[in-house]
Image: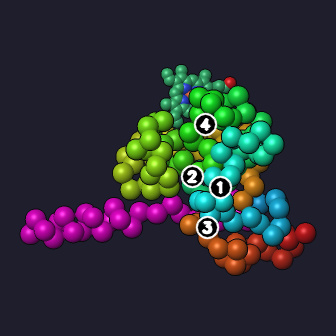
Amino acid sequence: MTTTIIFLFLSVVATEKIPIPYDIIRDFKGIVPVKIFTADELKDYGGSDPTKPIYLALKGVVFDVSTRREFYGKNAVYNRLVGRDSTNAVAKMSLHETDVSKAHDISDLSETQLKDLEQIFHQVYLAKYPIVGFMDYLLSVEEFAKQIKPQDEL
Ligand code: HEM
Protein backbone atom coordinates (compact mmCIF):
# COMPACT_ATOMS: atom_id res chain seq x y z
CA MET A 1 0.00 0.00 0.00
CA THR A 2 2.70 2.46 1.05
CA THR A 3 4.73 1.48 -2.02
CA THR A 4 1.73 2.18 -4.27
CA ILE A 5 1.22 5.61 -2.72
CA ILE A 6 4.91 6.47 -3.08
CA PHE A 7 4.86 5.25 -6.70
CA LEU A 8 1.77 7.34 -7.53
CA PHE A 9 3.29 10.40 -5.88
CA LEU A 10 6.57 10.01 -7.78
CA SER A 11 4.72 9.50 -11.09
CA VAL A 12 2.85 12.77 -10.64
CA VAL A 13 5.97 14.69 -9.62
CA ALA A 14 8.12 13.16 -12.35
CA THR A 15 5.70 14.13 -15.13
CA GLU A 16 5.50 17.78 -14.07
CA LYS A 17 6.83 19.67 -17.05
CA ILE A 18 6.82 23.28 -18.10
CA PRO A 19 3.85 23.72 -20.43
CA ILE A 20 4.58 25.00 -23.92
CA PRO A 21 3.57 28.70 -23.96
CA TYR A 22 1.52 28.59 -27.18
CA ASP A 23 0.16 32.11 -26.62
CA ILE A 24 3.69 33.58 -26.54
CA ILE A 25 4.83 31.52 -29.51
CA ARG A 26 1.84 32.63 -31.62
CA ASP A 27 2.49 36.28 -30.79
CA PHE A 28 6.23 35.95 -31.39
CA LYS A 29 7.29 38.35 -34.13
CA GLY A 30 11.01 37.88 -33.55
CA ILE A 31 13.65 36.21 -35.63
CA VAL A 32 12.25 33.88 -38.30
CA PRO A 33 13.35 31.13 -38.52
CA VAL A 34 13.27 31.11 -34.76
CA LYS A 35 16.36 30.20 -32.78
CA ILE A 36 15.99 27.04 -30.72
CA PHE A 37 18.79 26.82 -28.12
CA THR A 38 20.41 23.81 -26.55
CA ALA A 39 21.67 24.24 -22.97
CA ASP A 40 25.23 24.13 -24.34
CA GLU A 41 24.58 26.90 -26.88
CA LEU A 42 23.06 29.13 -24.24
CA LYS A 43 26.28 28.91 -22.19
CA ASP A 44 27.97 31.21 -24.75
CA TYR A 45 25.69 34.04 -23.62
CA GLY A 46 26.59 33.98 -19.94
CA GLY A 47 27.97 37.51 -19.80
CA SER A 48 31.68 36.77 -19.69
CA ASP A 49 32.30 38.07 -23.23
CA PRO A 50 31.45 41.81 -23.31
CA THR A 51 30.99 41.69 -27.10
CA LYS A 52 28.20 39.10 -26.89
CA PRO A 53 24.62 39.60 -25.73
CA ILE A 54 23.49 38.10 -22.42
CA TYR A 55 20.64 35.58 -22.47
CA LEU A 56 18.55 34.17 -19.65
CA ALA A 57 15.94 31.46 -20.16
CA LEU A 58 12.86 31.22 -18.02
CA LYS A 59 10.27 28.50 -18.60
CA GLY A 60 12.08 27.68 -21.84
CA VAL A 61 11.68 31.19 -23.27
CA VAL A 62 15.06 32.85 -23.98
CA PHE A 63 15.28 36.55 -23.15
CA ASP A 64 17.99 39.04 -24.09
CA VAL A 65 18.85 40.77 -20.80
CA SER A 66 21.90 42.65 -22.15
CA THR A 67 20.38 46.03 -21.24
CA ARG A 68 20.97 45.16 -17.58
CA ARG A 69 24.63 44.15 -17.82
CA GLU A 70 25.11 45.72 -14.38
CA PHE A 71 22.92 42.90 -12.93
CA TYR A 72 23.78 40.05 -15.23
CA GLY A 73 27.26 40.71 -16.65
CA LYS A 74 30.57 39.19 -15.55
CA ASN A 75 30.95 39.29 -11.74
CA ALA A 76 27.55 41.00 -11.37
CA VAL A 77 25.18 39.96 -8.59
CA TYR A 78 22.85 37.87 -10.80
CA ASN A 79 25.45 36.57 -13.27
CA ARG A 80 24.90 33.04 -12.02
CA LEU A 81 21.41 33.06 -13.54
CA VAL A 82 22.44 33.79 -17.13
CA GLY A 83 23.66 31.62 -19.99
CA ARG A 84 21.21 28.98 -18.78
CA ASP A 85 17.60 28.26 -17.95
CA SER A 86 17.11 29.57 -14.41
CA THR A 87 13.45 28.68 -13.91
CA ASN A 88 13.92 26.76 -10.66
CA ALA A 89 16.19 29.35 -9.00
CA VAL A 90 14.11 32.36 -10.04
CA ALA A 91 10.92 30.70 -8.77
CA LYS A 92 12.60 30.26 -5.38
CA MET A 93 14.45 33.60 -5.50
CA SER A 94 17.59 31.60 -4.85
CA LEU A 95 21.14 31.99 -6.03
CA HIS A 96 22.29 28.69 -4.53
CA GLU A 97 24.06 26.47 -7.03
CA THR A 98 21.86 23.51 -6.03
CA ASP A 99 18.77 25.41 -7.24
CA VAL A 100 20.43 27.10 -10.21
CA SER A 101 21.64 23.70 -11.43
CA LYS A 102 18.06 22.40 -11.41
CA ALA A 103 17.49 24.55 -14.52
CA HIS A 104 13.90 24.04 -15.77
CA ASP A 105 13.01 21.26 -13.36
CA ILE A 106 9.85 22.46 -11.64
CA SER A 107 9.05 19.24 -9.80
CA ASP A 108 10.12 20.51 -6.37
CA LEU A 109 8.38 23.89 -6.56
CA SER A 110 5.54 24.70 -4.16
CA GLU A 111 2.23 26.22 -5.28
CA THR A 112 3.44 29.61 -4.02
CA GLN A 113 6.74 29.33 -5.88
CA LEU A 114 4.90 28.40 -9.08
CA LYS A 115 2.71 31.48 -8.66
CA ASP A 116 5.77 33.67 -7.96
CA LEU A 117 7.38 32.27 -11.09
CA GLU A 118 4.35 33.24 -13.21
CA GLN A 119 4.40 36.73 -11.77
CA ILE A 120 8.14 37.27 -12.36
CA PHE A 121 7.86 35.74 -15.83
CA HIS A 122 5.12 38.17 -16.87
CA GLN A 123 5.87 41.30 -14.87
CA VAL A 124 9.66 41.30 -15.17
CA TYR A 125 10.87 39.29 -18.13
CA LEU A 126 8.03 39.46 -20.67
CA ALA A 127 7.46 43.10 -19.79
CA LYS A 128 11.10 44.20 -19.99
CA TYR A 129 13.14 42.02 -22.29
CA PRO A 130 12.98 40.92 -25.94
CA ILE A 131 12.52 37.21 -26.66
CA VAL A 132 15.31 35.79 -28.81
CA GLY A 133 14.24 32.17 -28.98
CA PHE A 134 13.15 29.06 -27.11
CA MET A 135 14.87 26.12 -25.43
CA ASP A 136 15.01 22.81 -27.23
CA TYR A 137 13.45 21.01 -24.28
CA LEU A 138 10.28 23.01 -24.90
CA LEU A 139 9.88 22.43 -28.62
CA SER A 140 11.77 21.76 -31.86
CA VAL A 141 12.00 24.13 -34.84
CA GLU A 142 9.33 22.03 -36.60
CA GLU A 143 6.99 22.21 -33.63
CA PHE A 144 7.57 25.94 -33.45
CA ALA A 145 6.73 26.38 -37.15
CA LYS A 146 3.42 24.55 -36.67
CA GLN A 147 2.40 27.12 -34.07
CA ILE A 148 2.95 30.13 -36.32
CA LYS A 149 0.07 30.96 -38.64
CA PRO A 150 1.14 31.56 -42.29
CA GLN A 151 0.20 35.27 -42.16
CA ASP A 152 2.46 35.71 -39.12
CA GLU A 153 5.56 34.48 -40.85
CA LEU A 154 6.58 37.71 -42.58
C1 HEM B 1 18.47 40.69 0.19
C2 HEM B 1 18.27 40.17 -0.99
C3 HEM B 1 17.92 40.94 -2.23
C4 HEM B 1 17.70 42.26 -2.43
C5 HEM B 1 17.73 43.39 -1.43
C6 HEM B 1 17.40 42.43 -3.83
C7 HEM B 1 17.11 43.64 -4.43
C8 HEM B 1 16.81 43.81 -5.74
C9 HEM B 1 16.42 45.04 -6.37
C10 HEM B 1 16.27 46.37 -5.66
C11 HEM B 1 16.20 44.79 -7.67
C12 HEM B 1 15.68 45.75 -8.73
C13 HEM B 1 16.74 46.59 -9.32
C14 HEM B 1 16.17 47.47 -10.41
O1 HEM B 1 15.26 47.08 -11.17
O2 HEM B 1 16.68 48.58 -10.54
C15 HEM B 1 16.50 43.40 -7.90
C16 HEM B 1 16.43 42.77 -9.11
C17 HEM B 1 16.59 41.43 -9.28
N1 HEM B 1 16.70 40.45 -8.30
FE1 HEM B 1 17.10 40.84 -6.37
N2 HEM B 1 17.44 41.22 -4.43
C18 HEM B 1 17.74 40.29 -3.48
C19 HEM B 1 17.88 38.93 -3.65
C20 HEM B 1 17.68 38.28 -4.84
C21 HEM B 1 17.81 36.84 -5.00
C22 HEM B 1 18.16 35.83 -3.91
C23 HEM B 1 17.55 36.59 -6.30
C24 HEM B 1 17.59 35.19 -6.87
C25 HEM B 1 17.00 34.82 -7.97
C26 HEM B 1 17.28 37.85 -6.95
C27 HEM B 1 17.00 38.01 -8.28
C28 HEM B 1 16.84 39.23 -8.90
C29 HEM B 1 16.81 39.40 -10.33
C30 HEM B 1 16.93 38.30 -11.37
C31 HEM B 1 16.66 40.78 -10.56
C32 HEM B 1 16.66 41.46 -11.90
C33 HEM B 1 15.30 41.48 -12.52
C34 HEM B 1 15.38 42.29 -13.80
O3 HEM B 1 16.00 41.83 -14.76
O4 HEM B 1 14.78 43.36 -13.82
N3 HEM B 1 17.35 38.84 -6.03
N4 HEM B 1 16.85 42.82 -6.71
What residue did someone put label 1 on? 42
Q: CA distance from mark 4 to mark 2?
A: 12 Å
Mark 2 C-beta closer than 8 Å to ligand 1: no
Please tell me the numbered disc located at residue 136: 3
124 and 90: which one is in front? 90
Image coordinates for residue 29, horizontal then vertical, percent:
82, 60
131 and 53: which one is in front? 53
Q: CA distance from mark 1 to mark 3?
A: 11 Å
Q: Amino acid at mark 1?
A: Leu
Other-residue count near label 1 (Cα within 10 Å), few / some / many at <14 / 14–19 / ≥20: many
What residue did someone put label 4 on? 79
Q: How has the structure been colored for display?
A: rainbow
What residue did someone put label 2 on? 85
Q: Amino acid at mark 2?
A: Asp
Identify the mark nearer the N-term, 4 or 3.
4
On whether residue 25 falls in the magenta region, the answer is yes
